[in-house]
Image (tube, rainbow, N blue to C red):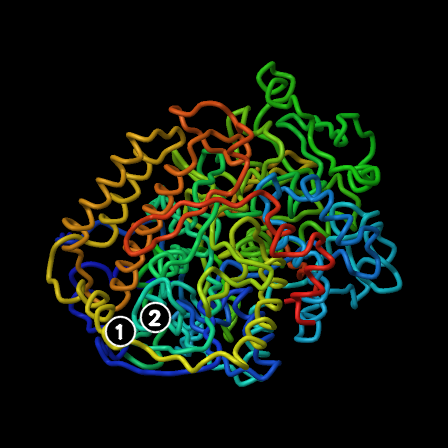
Amino acid sequence: MEARMTPNPQTPCAAVLFDAALCNGCNRCADVCPNDVMVHDLDKGKHPVVLYPDECWFCGCCVGHCPKPGAIRMEHPLSLRVGWKRKETGERFRIGMKNPPSPNTRPPVGGW
Amino acid sequence: MTSRVSETVGPECDREPWPYPVGYGHETELSADVLVVGGGIAGCHAAISAARRGAKVIVIDKGAVVRSGSGGAGVDHWGGAFTNPCSKITPEEAIAKSDEHSPMSSAYAVKHIQYITFKESWDAALDMEDWGMAIRDEDDDFVGADFRDEETKLLFAYDYDARTVLRVQGADVKVYLHREMKRLGITILDRVMATSLLSEGGKPGGRVVGATGLNVRTGEFYVLKAKAIILTTGQPLRIWVFNTELAGSYTAHDDPNCAGDGCAIAWRAGAEFALMERSMDSSGPFRYPAYGTGNPTNTWYGCSIVDANGKEIPWVDSDGALLTTIEQRFHPKPGKGLARLIPDLAERIKSGEFALPLYADLPAMPEHERRAIFGLMVCHEGKTRIPIYKTYTEAGFDPDQDMLQANVLPAEVTGRIPVWWDVKSSGASAVQWRETAFGGGGGLLVDWDMKTNLEGLYAAGNQVTGYMGHVSAAATGRYAGRKVAEYVRTAPDPVADRLQVDTEKERVYRPVAREDGIGWKELQAGVSRIMQDYCGREKSETVLRKGLEWLASIEESEAARAYARNPHELWRTLEVMVRMTVSEMIIHASLARRASSKDLDFWRFDYPELDPPEWKKFVTTRLDEGVVKVGDRPLGFWLEEPYAASYEENYRLHSAR
């Protein structure tokens, strides 16, 4: 096993995650971010570099402006993940759990 | 899914060049009739309003105007709409009873700002409708709902009889504003931070003739000249608590860019402030995503709350009488405040009657109410569309079946009324209102023209003292835009003082000339520590003065060694300098109020008497040739000389409609 001299991982979390296969590198996410959490990659066409995840406000605007569904998602840090209880069964679920329930696909009022 | 975080921090990252062209010192000079500093809700409405009246307008913002600011990620309820066709309350009735009507109000609400908001909230909503925001239930999702007006299709929140708060679909509110600004030909400079105001002849206290700016991506410098400047930056935040480790920039509610730039640059230019000493007790414990935990208030207003065993927490009306139906929560008696959970909840939790944690029992709510809370409000409110609605539903949360857990908080906090369990907790000791949200605290003092004490300098939105929020920002922004468009018709052409520009330019770039020293985060933590210790909840003359000594010492020692390795770090370093100035302003204002006040959540242990009559006034502060000048204004100054004696008459004289 290789060991390397590296700084500690950043907190609170990665904040923004990309699917490199879906992202077309348009940088719209980086250009709407109020805090420049991401910067453009030096290579055109690649997804932005998440340089300052610690400055993320978790507003999600980057995801909202993405033209390629699934290419980018935001992730709440573990310290901000909430839970819920299914009323009829008493089952307990939470954001980020290992075996989550099926997604609820109902769109919001006004649609996506 | 992959993330490149691990590849891009640390040594590997240090080898990558900055991805944007770096132009430290490169200067661009622009001029306009009106310069708007801060492209949030107030700034956009102000810019549009001035441009519609023919003014040439420049807007600058540290973020991208299409999404920047505390309102950049949405709005779901539009308050103060007293002139909408369904409202049962007039602006005049509302202002007369405003202490009861708004949680942001108190004896220290600045009510001409409030009145302007009440007069123009509905007009601003109609503007937004013109520009693309849905303010009505056009899709007929809520036909027959208790809160829907069938004729206008307007949807109302909270008090379904008074009908003064609209439910709107504003997740993309900034996108609509941005589009209208582009259409009107407004010059938008994204990623530009205002670093100073320029005064006529370079002399603070005189006419304001422009601002200097720094591009936070490229490091380029701007000299922006204008006949009038509207400051529409947000409230200063993360003064006492700056901690990105636990929750990123989540530890305070508003946009992380709200460092207090507007306050700091206006202070140095000689503008007059009020209520900077005000604080607000925090709920204390750490936050969860805003509007993202079970809650009975604000965006979740009216939602049934049950304890860990499914036992419902009863609701009472504002007189304390028990309510027996869900419907009653939305129908307070005329002129009465909203319903709430039982006031003795804390005691009943401690006695074991109710077990923590609590849950928001959405399935118990009627379908229309449930859909309005989770689907309309949570989805269009700030930072809820992606962070809550999308994230939670994709993870399986279903409001038809599921009860969202509330924060687990000490019983006293859970029982506090009113409380937004997710919004008012900010995560550390010694916190003050600015670290949480919605305190109606300090800022620039403006007159009925939204003008400050300085010629050429106006303000709107949260930058103004004594009232705040999205709708107030929209209403005061459009009002200030009108006033400024009128003013610039006869105002002289602005002339920037070269020495002032050069002095500021030299200051701005100092950190990039240093290879080492102190990083911005450590510096900010040190400044925050001074505020925690020397300007904490309980204040006294000697301790406050020690705080000023510490700040002055840090300024000439550590802050003078602050380094920045790229334009982004320069941006954040300059924001620490801003927070240092704001900290000094807060301490000076705290020293000036030599009395404790319950209304202001202001505690002086050397002056323990609460709200003595002679201190029921605004204490004002401003900088005059380096010396802090303290003044005062009576509560209600806006209805005294030189103004008219009634709200209606002042509005008629000043509103430029």
Q: Amino acid at mark 1?
A: Val
| Residue in the image at 71% along x and 68% along y | B134
Q: Is disc 1 in contact with disc 2, using a CB cutoff of under 8 Å?
A: yes
In the displayed structure image, the side of residue B258 where residue B312 appears, left or right: right
Q: Are marks 1 and 2 on the same chain?
A: yes
User: In terms of secondary structure, where does tag 2 sit?
Assistant: strand
Q: Quadrant of residue B139?
A: bottom right
Q: Which residue is outermost to the top?
A: B351
* Front one among B251 and B337: B337
In the displayed structure image, the side of residue B250 where residue B424 appears, left or right: right
Quarter of the rendering occupied by the N terminus of chain B: bottom left
Give the image location of residue B178, x and y in percent: 55, 75
Give the image location of residue B346, x and y in percent: 59, 22
| Residue in the image at 65% along x and 25% along y | B309
| Residue in the image at 56% along x and 46% along y | B292
Residue B198's label in the rendered image is 2
In the displayed structure image, the side of residue B119 where residue B618 appears, left or right: left
Quarter of the rendering occupied by the C terminus of chain B: bottom right
Residue B501's label in the rendered image is 1
In the displayed structure, B168 sits above or below B616; it is below
Tell me which numbered mark, 1 or 2, is placed earlier along the sequence. 2
* Front one among B240 and B327: B240
User: In terms of secondary structure, where does tag 1 sit?
Assistant: helix
Q: Tag 2, which chain? A: B
Q: Amino acid at mark 2?
A: Leu
